[in-house]
Amino acid sequence: MAVNYDYYRIFYFVAKYHSFTKAANILMNSQPNITRAMNNLEQELGCTLFLRSHKGVALTPEGEKLFARVQIAQEQLQAAEAELASDKNLDKGTVSLGVSETALHGLLLPVLREFHLTYPGVHIRLTNCSAPQAIAGVKSGQVEFAVVTMPEEVDRTLRKLPLVEVQDILVAGMHFLELKGKAISLKEAAEFPLICLGQDTKTYEFYNQLFAEQGLVLQPDIEAASTEQIIPLVRNDLGLAFLPGHLAQEPLEKGEIFEVKLSDKIPARHICMVWDPKRPTSIAAGKLEKMIREAVDGGSR
C-alpha cells in the first residue's frame, strides 16, 4: 500500500493536538486541506481514524494503533532534522583524522586550536600514527582524512594534496662534537650510530631508499616508536638522527644538540592531506579541511 507520506505527517499533528485547526496552523495550511487529507487517509486505509465532534477530534481504536507507530517515526525524523541543523551550525559533531607527529607539530596545532576555539561543541578525535597507518585508516573509513608526511604518491583510489614542505636535517648530541662545523657525506654519517623511526613508517622507507641510492645500507642502532622519542635519545648521545628542522628547532636553540652539515642533499618531503573521494565527510570535517587549506594559503602569501 503506497500511502502518501504527507498524510501520515498531517495525521500526527491532528492526533497530537486533537484539532484540525491547530494542525493547520502548525503546518501553515488551511483547515479544508487538512480535513481533505485525513479523509483521503481514512479511505486508503479502509478504516475510521477520528471521532469528530464540535469539541474537536478523538482517535478511534484504529487511530490509536496508527498514532503509536506514526509518533515514533515522526519524532525520530524531527530529532534527525534537529541534529542535522546542529551539525550544520557546528554546535556539535565529531571529526576524526589520522595525524603524524611531524604534521601535528609542523602544521596542525595552530589550526586545531583555532577550530576548537571557534567550534567548542565539536569533538576532535585524533589518531596519532605513522603515515601507512593513517592511510589505512582513510581506506577503512576509521578516519575521515589524514594529514601526514609523505615522500611519494598514494594509492590511486585516494587523493593527496601537498600542503607544506618539510626539510630534514641531521642532528647529534655533544658526544659527537668533532662533527660540528664539518660537512660530511651520507656514507660518513652511516659510520656513526644512527637513530631512526621503525621499519613500518614512511620515514624509514624514505631513508632506506636514500641510502640505497648511495650504495649504502640503512642499519640504525636504535629504532624509535615516535619522533618525540628521538630528541631525548640524541640529547643523551645515543646516536645521530635525521629530524624535520622545525621539530629540532627548540633543542638546537638551547644548545642541547647541534646540526651536522651534510654534503649530500636530503630531498624535501611534504606534509600532505589524504582523503578518499568516494567517502562523504561530515560537515565538521569539511570545515576543518577548509581551515587547514586556508592556513597553508595564508602562510604562502
Image (cartoon, grey):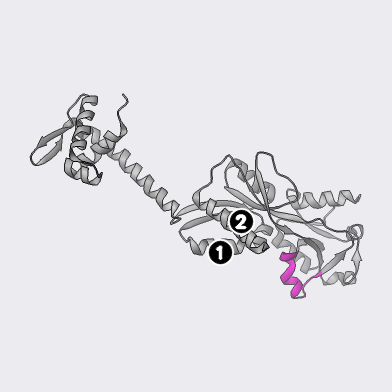
Asked whether the residues under the numbered discs 2 and 1 touch, taking CB atoms below 8 Å apart as contact, a structural biologist would say no
Confirm whether residue 270 shows in the render: yes
The answer to whether residue 160 is left or right of residue 252 is left
Q: Label 2 sits on what residue type?
A: Arg
The answer to whether residue 188 is left or right of residue 209 is right
Confirm whether residue 69 shows in the render: no
The quarter of the picture where the N terminus appears is top left
* Of residues 217 and 286, the one drawn nearer to the viewer in this rendering: 286
Residue drawn 58% across the image and 61% down it: 111
**Magenta span:** 245-258
Residue 140: which quarter of the image? top right
What is the secondary structure assignment of the residue under circle 2?
helix
User: In the image, which disc is placed on residue 113?
Assistant: 1
The answer to whether residue 255 is left or right of residue 57 is right
Q: Name the residue under label 2.
A: 293
Residue drawn 25% across the image and 39% down it: 12
The quarter of the picture where the C terminus appears is bottom right
Residue 7: which quarter of the image? top left
**Where residue 214 appears, x then y in whole percent?**
90, 51
